[in-house]
Image (tube, rainbow, N blue to C red):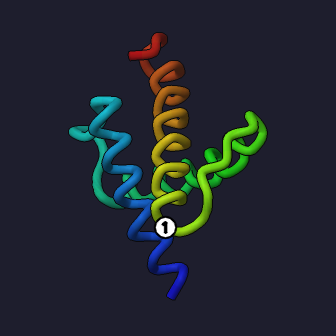
Amino acid sequence: MNFLIYLIVGGIAGWLASLVMKRDGSQGIILNVVVGIIGGFLGGWLLPTLGLGLGGGWVGFLITAFIGAVVLLLIVNLFTRGRAR
């Protein structure tokens, strides 16, 4: 059951990040979920390293995954477009 919740929350985080980074038109729902889940892992590693803790629960995971997904899309933009938006 937790895996399904991670997919849903990761998908929402990936979708929100793609809207913020203006990549929503080039991504589908599957890629949004993938970006959100990878962003969750990236944010889960990056935020505690910086000394930022967002707490537990699905809201903390959503915020962490969103921040990680935005960072991931920023890195993708740097490599695909040669500059950050």
User: Dot 1, crowdedness within 10 Å: few (<14), some or many (≥20)?
Assistant: few
Measuring from the top left, give residue 57's x and y in whole percent. 54, 68
Residue located 55% across and 49% down the image = 64
Measuring from the top left, give residue 38's x and y in whole percent. 57, 52
Residue 33 sits above or below residue 85 on the image? below
Quarter occupied by the C terminus? top left
Q: Residue furthest bottom?
A: 1
Measuring from the top left, give residue 49's x and y in whole percent. 78, 39
Q: Is residue 53 left or right of residue 19?
A: right
Which sits in the foreground, 32 or 59? 59
Q: How many numbered marks, from 0 up?
A: 1
Q: Is residue 25 left or right of residue 27?
A: left
State the image quarter where residue 68 is shown: top right
Residue located 51% across and 40% down the image = 67
Q: Residue furthest left?
A: 25
Give the SS element for disc 1: helix
Which sits in the foreground, 65 or 48? 48
Residue 19 sits above or below residue 62 on the image? above
Which sits in the foreground, 25 or 58? 58
Residue located 50% across and 30% down the image = 76
Residue 85 sits above or below residue 2 on the image? above
Residue located 27% across and 38% down the image = 19
Measuring from the top left, give residue 74's x and y in whole percent. 49, 27
Write down the residue under mark 1: 58
Q: Amino acid at mark 1?
A: Trp
